[in-house]
């Protein structure tokens, strides 16, 4: 297949002419998905260009998802969609209702010629590392939610610094990258302080906190509030196996434990506010209607998604603290 043309003395860079030749071959159906591209050496020799020029062209096609490299065999057509100009690697910790809000807000604020591949590491450091290593060279931008995993800088530092955005948690070792984050310690302290009068009606404040999944800042802010307002408190990892008692108020970051406490309330015939208080973390539509409404402390995930989309096109480093608020309902 001799469809690649590189001309001298025109304003289009030679590598871009190779890219355009491949695009035209796809439009003219000379190339189709699964076809092998001419080798780097054959393009170099026939068109009197350097090997680096051909590699530059192939790498652009690769990060746009049009071609893929197969070790020892060459480059093959992966997609016939030449409209894709940027391909984004998006790595979440896990998917839940509020992350869906973030994700769809992000997608809805992107141009149509940007393609997003989403992955999940499920708080597994080995999976986290593998997903990032496998992404190298295949994407134009990288959006990464490291959660509270340790030493994530060791693998993230393998990526182009100006193409990385860190999402949700701000770690010092990742400070050289752009980031949009929640200030968990400040947000939870300010939210609890705002509703201190309601919380003081209870005898004990119980925080259901998972060290492996929840940001450390939540724990620091909770402890500071309890100390400043002299509230008896307890920190437990899960509601599973926990007996609830009258006049306790619970702070519950995850939905699974929220369901558990609601079931335990029904078993004991307890009522919200009268017997038990509940504050959940992260707003979702479900929490508007469960038990006639659950009070939440939440960042604005739709705003986070919109701002994240804007950051893809901004030059220079950005460190953006996403806003948070209390949504007070009939549960405390």
Image: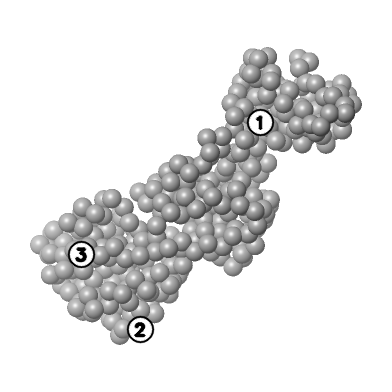
The structure's colour scheme is one colour
- Tell me where residue 31 sits by quadrant: top right
Q: Dot 3 lies on which element? A: loop
Q: Which residue is mark 3?
A: 331
Tag 2 near tag 1, CB within 8 Å? no
Within 10 Å of disc 2 (Cα), the crowding (few <14, some 14-19, many 20+) is: few
**Where residue 211 appears, x then y in whole percent?**
43, 65
**Where residue 7 appears, x then y in whole percent?**
84, 24
Foreground tag (3 vs 2): 3
What is the spatial separation of the Cα atoms under label 2 and label 1, in whole angstroms?
Answer: 56 Å
Return the disc, 3 or 2, that comes first in the chain's sequence: 2
299 is higher (above) or lower (below) than 50: below
What is the spatial separation of the Cα atoms under label 3 and label 2, in whole angstroms?
Answer: 23 Å
Q: Dot 2 lies on which element? A: helix
Q: Is residue 137 visible from the viewing direction of this image?
A: yes
287 is higher (above) or lower (below) than 72: below
Mark sitting on residue 227: 2
Q: Is residue 252 visible from the viewing direction of this image?
A: no
Q: Dot 1 lies on which element? A: strand
Residue at screen point 67% across, 34% down:
62
Residue at screen point 24% across, 54% down:
288
**Where residue 77 appears, x then y in whole percent?**
65, 24
Q: Which residue is mark 1?
A: 68
Query: In terms of depth relative to the viewer, which is nearer, 212 or 294?
Result: 294
Residue at screen point 73% across, 28% down:
19
């Amino acid at each position: 297949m001799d469809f690649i043309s590189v001309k001298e003395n025109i304003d289009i860079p030679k590598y871009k002419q190779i890219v355009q030749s491949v695009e035209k071959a796809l439009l003219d159906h000379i190339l189709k998905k699964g076809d092998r591209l001419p080798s780097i050496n054959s393009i170099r020799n026939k068109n009197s260009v350097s090997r680096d020029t051909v590699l530059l062209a192939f790498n652009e096609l690769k990060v746009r998802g049009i071609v893929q490299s197969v070790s020892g065999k060459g480059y093959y057509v992966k997609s016939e969609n030449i409209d894709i100009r940027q391909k984004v690697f998006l790595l979440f910790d896990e998917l839940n209702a509020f992350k869906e809000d973030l994700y769809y807000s992000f997608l809805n604020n992107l141009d149509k010629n940007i393609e997003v591949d989403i992955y999940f590491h499920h708080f597994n450091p080995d999976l986290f590392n593998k997903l990032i290593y496998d992404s190298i060279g295949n994407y134009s931008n990288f959006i990464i939610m490291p959660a509270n995993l340790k030493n994530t800088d060791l693998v993230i530092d393998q990526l182009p610094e100006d193409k990385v955005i860190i999402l949700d948690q701000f770690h010092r070792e990742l400070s050289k990258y752009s980031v949009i984050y929640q200030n968990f310690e400040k947000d939870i302290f300010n939210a609890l302080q705002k509703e201190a009068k309601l919380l003081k009606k209870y005898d004990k404040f119980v925080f259901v906190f998972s060290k492996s999944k929840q940001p450390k800042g939540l724990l620091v802010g909770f402890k500071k509030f309890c100390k400043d307002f002299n509230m008896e408190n307890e920190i437990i990892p899960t509601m599973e196996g926990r007996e609830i008692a009258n006049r306790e108020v619970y702070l519950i970051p995850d939905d699974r434990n929220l369901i558990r406490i609601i079931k335990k309330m029904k078993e004991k015939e307890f009522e919200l506010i009268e017997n038990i208080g509940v504050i959940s973390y992260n707003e979702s539509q479900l929490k508007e209607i469960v038990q006639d409404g659950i009070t939440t402390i939440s960042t604005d995930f739709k705003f986070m998604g919109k701002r994240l989309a804007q950051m893809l096109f901004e030059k220079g480093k950005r460190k953006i603290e996403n806003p948070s608020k209390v949504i007070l309902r009939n549960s405390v």
